[in-house]
Each structure stands twice: as C-alpha cells, then as structure tokens.
C-alpha cells in the first residue's frame, strides 16, 4: 500500500513539475503562424476554404477580407494562377469552382476556366 501511495505522489509531483516547466519556464513559442507566412500549398488550401465559405454564405465582403489576409500584391492574378495550377494538376472540380466563384467577383476570367465555370452555371 505504501508503494502505491508513493507512486501516486511521484506521479502527481512529476505532472506538477512538468506543467510548471511547460507553462511558465519554457512555454511554447509560436512563430511564422500568420497567414502570409504559410507555404504556398497551405495558402491554396486556405483559398479553397474561403471559396467554400463564400459559396455557403454568399458574403463577398467577408471572403474578400479573408483573401486580403494572404497579403498578395495582386490577389486577382494570384487567384487566376492558382486556378490554372489546380486545373493543370487535375484537382477536385468542386474546389476549382469555389476558386472561380471568387475570381468572378474580382473580374478575373480566362479561357481555361470556362469549362469549370459552365459546369457551375448549368
């Protein structure tokens, strides 16, 4: 019985010391976690998520604010290039249509996008 009690005291003390060290002495430090610092792959995934949210709620102002968080100099050109890359890579047509719906709001369209945009229209 004494060993079990000592083991429980040891576990509690170890957990307490671990929490003290982890939360106060050496806490986690986050860096490069802002949206503009994301790798291009994750920026593309973020844009698809913004497009999906835009399709769901139709709130263009919110979608535009979210796209602005990417801090691209020309978001329309960036979006067009992303759509072209997505089409060339054979990615999910639904995701491509999400991106095209935002590109339409920005007045960006190309011949490569037309077949995907037509699927959305019809």
Image (tube, helix red, strand yellow):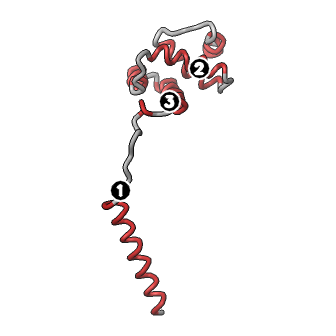
- For disc 2, the neighbor class at 10 Å (few under 14, some 14 to 19, many from 20) is many
- For disc 1, the neighbor class at 10 Å (few under 14, some 14 to 19, many from 20) is few
CA–CA distance between discs 2 and 1? 42 Å
| Contact? badges 2 and 3 (CB < 8 Å) | no
Of the numbered discs 3 and 1, the one sitting upstream in the chain is 1
Of the numbered discs 2 and 1, the one sitting upstream in the chain is 1
* Residue topped by disc 1: 27
Is 99 on the left-hand or right-hand side of 28? Answer: right
Of the numbered discs 2 and 3, the one sitting upstream in the chain is 3
Residue at the (44%, 87%) spot, across then down: 5
* Residue topped by disc 2: 97
Q: Can you say whether 2 is above or below 73 in the image?
A: below
Residue sitting farthest toward the right: 90
Q: Secondary structure at mark 2?
A: helix
| Contact? badges 3 and 1 (CB < 8 Å) | no
Taking depth in this image into account, of 19 and 51 the one nearest to the observer is: 19
Is 91 on the left-hand or right-hand side of 37? Answer: right
Taking depth in this image into account, of 119 and 12 the one nearest to the observer is: 12
Pair 2/3: label in front: 3
Residue 55 image position (x, y, % from top left): 51, 24
- For disc 3, the neighbor class at 10 Å (few under 14, some 14 to 19, many from 20) is some
* Residue topped by disc 3: 43
Q: Can you say whether 63 is above or below 119 in the image?
A: below
Q: Can you say whether 28 is above or below 57 in the image?
A: below
């Amino acid at each position: 019985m004494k060993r079990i009690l000592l083991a429980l005291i040891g576990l509690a003390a170890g957990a307490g010391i671990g929490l003290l060290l982890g939360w106060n002495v050496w806490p986690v430090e986050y860096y490069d976690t802002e949206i503009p610092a994301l790798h291009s792959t994750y920026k593309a995934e973020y844009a698809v998520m913004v497009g999906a949210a835009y399709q769901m709620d139709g709130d263009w102002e919110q979608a535009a604010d979210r796209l602005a968080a990417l801090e691209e100099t020309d978001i329309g050109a960036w979006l067009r290039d992303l759509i072209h890359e997505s089409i060339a890579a054979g990615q999910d047509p639904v995701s491509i249509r999400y991106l095209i719906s935002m590109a339409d709001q920005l007045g960006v369209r190309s011949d490569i996008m037309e077949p995907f945009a037509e699927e959305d229209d019809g």
